Amino acid sequence: MADSVYKVIEVIGTSTESWEKAATVAVTRASKTLRDLRVAEVVELDMAIEKGKVAAYRAKVKLSFKFEGD
């Protein structure tokens, strides 16, 4: 295996259904503009609350992708 370098970014996905769906939304959206995603790590879960009720589930996700080129 050749030496490699990876970049890690954080994104936050939201869903009115679940944390799992929020994490999936984050990865799905990021994959539209980032190539060669390798690992997704959920690092934080929280909820947006409106008028005392859960309005949205949020998942902060670290994504890594491989640098291209030489």
Image (tube, helix red, strand yellow):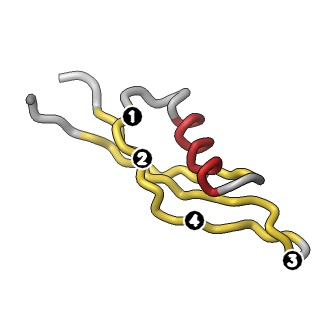
Tell me where residue 59 appears, x and y as whole percent. Answer: 58, 57
Residue 45 disc label: 4
Q: Do the residues labelled 3 and 1 touch (CB within 8 Å)?
A: no
| Three-letter code, disc 2 | Ala
Residue identified by numbered label 1? 37
Tell me where residue 22 appears, x and y as whole percent. Answer: 63, 50
- Using the numbered discs, state the Cα–Cα distance from disc 3 to disc 4 in whole angstroms: 18 Å
Residue at x 42% of width, y 47% of height:
40
Q: Are marks 3 and 4 in contact (CB under 8 Å)?
A: no
From this view, report whether residue 22 is shown above or below residue 45.
above
| Three-letter code, disc 3 | Gly
Residue at x 9% of width, y 29% of height:
2
- Using the numbered discs, state the Cα–Cα distance from disc 2 to disc 4 in whole angstroms: 14 Å
Tell me where residue 13 appears, x and y as whole percent. Answer: 62, 50
SS at circle 4: strand
From this view, report whether residue 59 is shown above or below residue 37.
below
**Residue situated furthest top in the rendering:** 69
Residue identified by numbered label 2? 40
- Using the numbered discs, state the Cα–Cα distance from disc 4 to disc 1 in whole angstroms: 21 Å
Residue 52 disc label: 3
Q: Which of marks 4 and 1 is nearer the N terminus?
A: 1
Callout 1: few (<14), some (14-19), or many (20+) C-alpha neighbours within 10 Å?
Answer: some
| Three-letter code, disc 4 | Leu
| Three-letter code, disc 1 | Leu
Q: Earlier in the sequence, mark 2 or mark 4?
A: 2
- Using the numbered discs, state the Cα–Cα distance from disc 1 to disc 2 in whole angstroms: 8 Å
Q: Do the residues labelled 4 and 1 touch (CB within 8 Å)?
A: no
Q: Which of marks 2 and 3 is nearer the N terminus?
A: 2
SS at circle 2: strand
**Quadrant in the picture for the N terminus:** top left
Residue 26 in which image quadrant: top right
